Amino acid sequence: MSINDELIWQQLNGDFCSFKAKVQTQNFCRNEMNVTGLCNKSACPLANSRYATIREIDGRCYLMVKTIERAHLPSKLWQKIRLPRNYAAALSKITQELEHFPKYLQHRNKQRLTRIHQYLMRMRKLALRSRPTLTTIKKKVERREDRKEVKALAAAKLSKSIEAELLQRLKQGTYGDIYNFESTAWNEALDKEQQAQEESEDEDEEELREMIEYCEQSESEDEIEDVADRIVPEPLPVKKRKAPSARARVAIEYDDEDSEAEAEPVAAMAF
């Protein structure tokens, strides 16, 4: 690092730098040419006359090289070298271009190239997946459309009520025989009435058919019952019971006279 670079770093580190982002642990650099993203003396692109970094532009990697010979031309300060898409070929290209640069810058540029290739691969994989698209919802426009819809419905109801009232007055003959109105609404009303009459007639015919079918079914059921009543069932044969067999009678003989005397009044009472 030259004396000029040392003075620049003292000024940026001590006083003020617009690219510095301070946090509690360490300081970061927001400059797009910073190879590491950290705010230190070796990684600062402003305080190093010989510097190199990797940038990704539209999916392609470029090696940005800064040399002291172009310090007097700010518009041509950085040389832009396009790297091949192949990772191994890009590494060899970096080694070839940064042959006389510090080893620290060579190693950091290769690390940066590796990280860029990794997130480009992830981007290509995510692009192949189907993801839902997010759209913004404009609440103000929705409220305006809702108000318009409510007003349109109210106007439609009002026009229908006016049309119905006019048709009713025309039917009643309020305006007399001569009137100068459009006949479209009147014809539509007549068509609706005719359709309603036809539908009612069809319903009456269907009810009449159902009644006729019901009556025919009931008559057929009555005829079946009459035929069933006329058919006399044959009497079932009755089995005769056998007469009971004659049992032997037992004669009781009384030896004593007293017993005979007692038996006579009992026999008389039985007869």
Image (spheres, grey):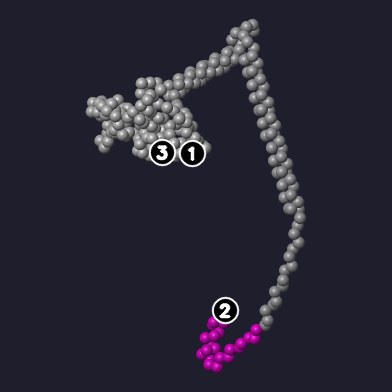
Instruction: List x then y, in percent, for residue 266.
Output: 54, 82
Which numbered dot is residue 270? 2
Does 207 sit left or right of 259 as displayed? right
Which numbered dot is residue 110? 3
The nearer-to-camera label among 2 and 3 is: 3
Q: Does residue 134 appear in this view?
A: no
**Above or below, comparing residue 78 to residue 221 in the picture:** above
Instruction: List x then y, in percent, for residue 225.
Output: 72, 50
Q: Does residue 257 appear in this view?
A: yes
The reply to whether the magenta stretch includes residue 252 is yes
Choose top left, top right, bottom left or bottom right for residue 220.
Answer: top right
CA neighbours of label 2 inside 10 A, class few (<14), some (14 to 19), many (20+): few
Q: Which amino acid does label 1 sit on?
A: Ala
Specify the segment rendered in magenta: 247-271
The reply to whether the magenta stretch includes residue 267 is yes
**Above or below, comparing residue 208 to residue 152 in the picture:** below
**Above or below, comparing residue 50 to residue 74 in the picture:** below
Instruction: List x then y, in percent, for residue 133.
Output: 49, 32
Question: Which numbered disc flags the more N-terminal residue, 1 or 2?
Answer: 1
Q: Name the residue under label 1.
A: 89
Q: What residue type is labelled 2?
A: Ala
Choose top left, top right, bottom left or bottom right for residue 64.
Answer: top left
What residue sits 29% from the left and 33% below the top?
41
What residue sits 64% from the left and 6% below the top?
178
